[in-house]
Amino acid sequence: MADMLPPVLLVGCGNMGGAMLDGWLKEGLAPSFIIDRHRPSVPAPHHLVRSADEVPDSFHPGMIVLATKPQKVDAVMSAIAPFALRAPVLSVLAGRRSGDLADRLTDALPAGSPMPVVIRAMPNTPSSIGQGMSVCYALPAATPTQRALCTRLLRAVGDVAWIDHEDQMDVVTAISGSGPAYVFLLAELLEETGVAQGLPPALARQIARQTVAGAGALMIQGGMDAATLRRNVTSPGGTTQQALEVLMAPDAWPAALATAVRAAARRSRELSGASPVS
């Protein structure tokens, strides 16, 4: 197949790694190696191994993808470092900065080896259904071809954007990485309020979930910005306006959401060891 994805060395195949692998398999993936201790199997012609030491030296991946838990990746650095001389590394590890990963890989290589190319990405959980949002940052050594391959791999599970400054990844994490939880909370609260106001629980759940899902789909498919869509559904003096006057009060949603995003971004900086931003 002319446009088949190149072989991948996937390190970790849990929720996010598994979502990416499923997307790549649908696109068509050249024979690859997947390192995971828990996954029962992978379809042929791909290879599942339990340790990085089991990947043959003769394997030449097009991309190495780090999708383990962030605290566990250091244990595999020595084993995967030689492959990082042959292919760029795509990390989807929360809180691990690209320069730190490149330094650790370099430390595991013979003296004088070139520094591996590391690209950092933050996908989110809707990637599991092909509706994810991934934001990427590449160290300067990454070539346009390597960036394009990263984009292609991540587009298999959703939309992709790039940033020029890695410090922006903390805000990205707070919005798109953590954002699905904020949306789930909205659906949860709508459901709870519906029950409290007398709706049967099953009906409250159905209308809360479909309302959130349908509104999201309308934003994507309709092409209008969120503010315009909000105004379109808000009739002067109507029920929606009454609700929005409560939610949009300066000390309500505008303040609460801004505070929440700042808190998440601050925690992302703490986890990555970066200097705090006031």
Image (tube, grey):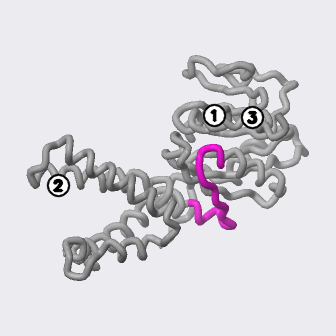
Q: Are marks 3 and 2 in contact (CB under 8 Å)?
A: no
> N-terminal of the two: label 3 or label 2?
3
What's the magenta region?
A: 155-169
> N-terminal of the two: label 2 or label 1?
1
Disc marking residue 193? 2
Pinpoint residue 137: horizontal percent, then vertical percent: 68, 58
> N-terminal of the two: label 1 or label 3?
3
The span from disc 1 to disc 3 (Cα, nearest Å) is 9 Å
* 230 with respect to 178 (left or right): left
Pinpoint residue 176: horizontal percent, then vertical percent: 50, 57
* 249 with respect to 138 (left or right): left
Q: Counting other residues with Cα less than 10 Å from the Cα at mark 1, is it few (<14), some (14-19), or many (20 or more)?
A: many
Q: Is residue 72 visible?
A: no
Q: Residue at x 82, y 38 (%)?
A: 109
Pinpoint residue 205: horizontal percent, then vertical percent: 24, 45
Q: Amino acid at mark 2?
A: Thr
Q: Which structural element holds mark 1? A: helix
Pinpoint residue 53: horizontal percent, then vertical percent: 74, 22
Q: Nearer the viewer, residue 36 or 44?
A: 44
Q: On the image, numbered disc 1 is attached to which residue?
A: 21
